[in-house]
Amino acid sequence: MVKIKYDDKVVMRVEQGKRRNNLKGLFDSQIKILEDRNVPELIIAEFQDKKSFVLDKASRMTIGKGNIPFLPIIPSAYLGYYGLMSMVKIELKSGHTSIINPILIKDQIQTPTNGLYYIFDVEDGESTRNNSPESVIQTFEEQSRSPLIADEIVNLCIITDVLYRHYVYAIGSRFGNFDKVPAVYLDGSSGFPELGWLYIYHSGDYWGSPSCDILRA
């Protein structure tokens, strides 16, 4: 059995303290973005109430290199896809949706049913670029990772600048038939962020499938 010296314990506590401070800074910066997007105060307050829980959980997790430790999720039931997409900003351009009937979006992944929640250890899709949604589903299963649903990719685009790097599929959801997935991208003619759909076998270097830890809370 390896004995940990007192000095080592002090170093460990200092490192844990630094990590928690970094996570606290991330949490606060995400809340600031939501405030700047004019998210209702009651939603902001509910996320703030989760702060200690989120920081504690993320502090204990192993986060993949380059991954986002945690991300707040506003389900579409709160503001609708039209409302959520309006908060996706590219410079002065606000997002919209080309999906006239959002009811046709069906989630394949179980998510918390008690309202606002967080996802953890989020990979923004960079690692799956140039791979079709169909081709990475099994990989996620083998890695015990969860693909993001439509609500979650929209929130990812609200909080981060992912659309400056690549577009994102929501392979945790389907649109209409099982051969279509929701996606967020920049409209080719106007450059505005758009929520639409693509076929599950579509691929391209400018496209990726985000994923997260299988536990959402």
Image: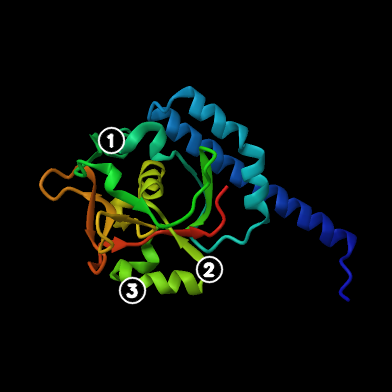
Above or below, comparing residue 27 to residue 67 in the picture: above
Q: Position of residue 61 (x, y in %)?
A: 64, 58
Please tell me the numbered disc located at residue 201: none
Q: Residue 38 lies in what quarter of the image?
A: top left
Name the residue beneath numbered marker 3.
135
Indicate the amino acid at tag 1: Tyr
- Residue 203 vs 195, above or below: the answer is below
- What is the secondary structure assignment of the residue under circle 2? loop
Q: Distance between the residues labelled 2 and 1?
A: 32 Å
Which coloring applies here?
Answer: rainbow
SS type, badge 1 = helix
- Looking at the rendered structure, the kind of residue marked 3 is Ser
Q: Can residue 111 be seen in this view?
A: yes
Instruction: Answer with left or right where residue 36 lies relative to residue 112.
Output: left
Whichever of labels 2 and 1 marks the residue nearer the N terminus, that label is: 1
Q: What residue type is labelled 2?
A: Ser
Q: Which residue is drawn at 30% across and 50% down?
A: 163
Look at the numbered discs 1 and 3 and tell me whether their residues touch, using CB distance below 8 Å. Answer: no
Q: How many labels does the image show?
A: 3
* Mark 3–mark 2 distance (CA, rounded to whole Å): 16 Å
Residue 130 place in picture, x, y as percent: 28, 70
Task: Say few, some or many: other residues with alpha carbon within 10 Å of mark 3 (under 14 / 14 to 19 / 20 or more).
Answer: some
- On the rendered image, what quadrant is the N terminus found in? bottom right
Q: Is residue 43 left or right of residue 49?
A: left
Badge 1 or badge 3: first in the primary sequence? 1
Q: Mark 2 points at which residue?
A: 144
* Contact check, label 2 and label 1, Cβ < 8 Å: no
Residue at 48%, 60% in the rendered image? 66
* x, y percent for residue 63: 57, 60
**Label 1: which residue?**
82
**Mark-to-mark CA distance, 1 and 3:** 30 Å
Tell whether 195 sits left or right of 2. Answer: left
